[in-house]
Image (tube, rainbow, N blue to C red):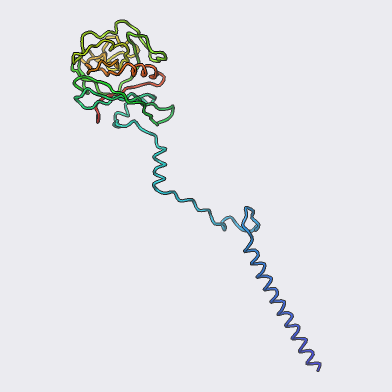
Amino acid sequence: MAARHAQQRGMRIRMTRRGKAVSGLALTTLVGTALWAWPASGDDHDGHRSEQARPAPSAPEVPAHAAAGHAQATAPRAIPGLSDATRKQIPADSRQVLVVTGQGVDQHDSSVVLYTRAQDSDDWRPGARWAAHNASRGWTKDHRYGDLRSPEGVFTLSDAGGKLAPPEGTKLPYDRNDSFVAHGTGVEGEPLGGAFDYVIAIDYNRVKGSSPLDQRRPMGAQKGGGVWLHVDHDGPTQGCISLKPEVMQELLRTLDPAQHPVIVMGPAGH
C-alpha cells in the first residue's frame, strides 16, 4: 500500500512538473505573440536593436522622362543660332547681346533680338523680335568701303547720338548734333529723311568713346566705317542695320554700358 501511495505521489509530482512546463510554454507563446503584435512607433522600445537591423527606406523611383524634363527645365538657356566660335567672342562680362540675323548671305532683310542675362547667370532670355534691314548686297567677313555689304562679327556698342534729343532713360553716351543728316536717297531710291534721328555706333573700325560722327578709322579707310544702327528708311542700307524709330528708342533706353552690350551680326547659319 505504501508503495502504491509513493508511486501515485511520484506521478502527481511528474504531472505537476509537466503541467508547469506546458504552462510556461503557453506563457512564452503568448508573450511572443504580444510582442510581435506591438504597434510600430518612432520610439525604439528595444534598446538592444541596432540601426543596421532596421530596413532602410527605399527611395522613390523617378521616371526617366521626368528626370530628363527636370534637367532640361533647370539647364541654362544659350543664345540660339550661334556657333561655339562666335559665343567665345562674346565678352564674359556682357549681359546684353543684340543678335542681328540676316535671311541669307546676299539678302538685305534681317531680324533682331536682344538677349539679356542676370548677373552671375548663364541663362540668356530673349526679348521681342524686330524686323530690320542690312546692306543691299548682304554680308561679308571682309568688309571694304563701298562694297554695299554689312560686316559679320561680334562688336561692342559704346556710343550713340542723333539729330533728335535722346529718349528719356538713355544710358549710352549720346551726342545730339545737327550734323546727323542723311543726304540724297537710299540704294533703292527711297528718301532718307529722319534716318539719323537716332543712331547707335557699331564698334567696327572706329574709336570707342567718341561720337558716331568721328571719322577716325584705326584699320584704315579702305576697311570702311560709320557702321551704325539707325532709323529704318524702308529699304536696304550701305552697310548699317536699320530699325523702326520706336525700336531705336527702346534700344537707347535699354542698352546699358554697365552691362557691356555687344552686337552679333551676320546671315543665318554663319
Q: Quadrant of the N terminus?
A: bottom right
Residue 241 position within the rendered picture, expressed as x and y whole percent measured from the top left = 27, 19
Instruction: Tell whether 63 sits left or right of 87.
Output: right
Residue 54 position within the rendered picture, expressed as x and y whole percent measured from the top left = 57, 57
Q: Quadrant of the C terminus?
A: top left
Residue at 42% of width from left, 37% of height from top?
74
Residue at 53% of width from left, 53% of height from top?
57
Residue at 66% of width from left, 57% of height from top?
45
Residue 92 position within the rendered picture, expressed as x and y whole percent measured from the top left = 37, 26
> Residue 134 or 159: which is nearer the viewer?
134
> Residue 132 or 234: which is nearer the viewer?
234
Q: Is residue 6 above or below residue 232?
A: below
Q: Quadrant of residue 263?
A: top left
Q: Quadrant of residue 139?
A: top left
Residue 21 position within the rendered picture, expressed as x and y whole percent measured from the top left = 70, 76
As drawn, the residue found furthest toward the right would be 2
> Residue 250 or 137: which is nearer the viewer?
250
Instruction: Tell whether 254 sits left or right of 244.
Output: right
Tally the marks. Answer: 0
Residue at 65% of width from left, 70% of height from top?
29
As drawn, the residue found furthest toward the top would be 178
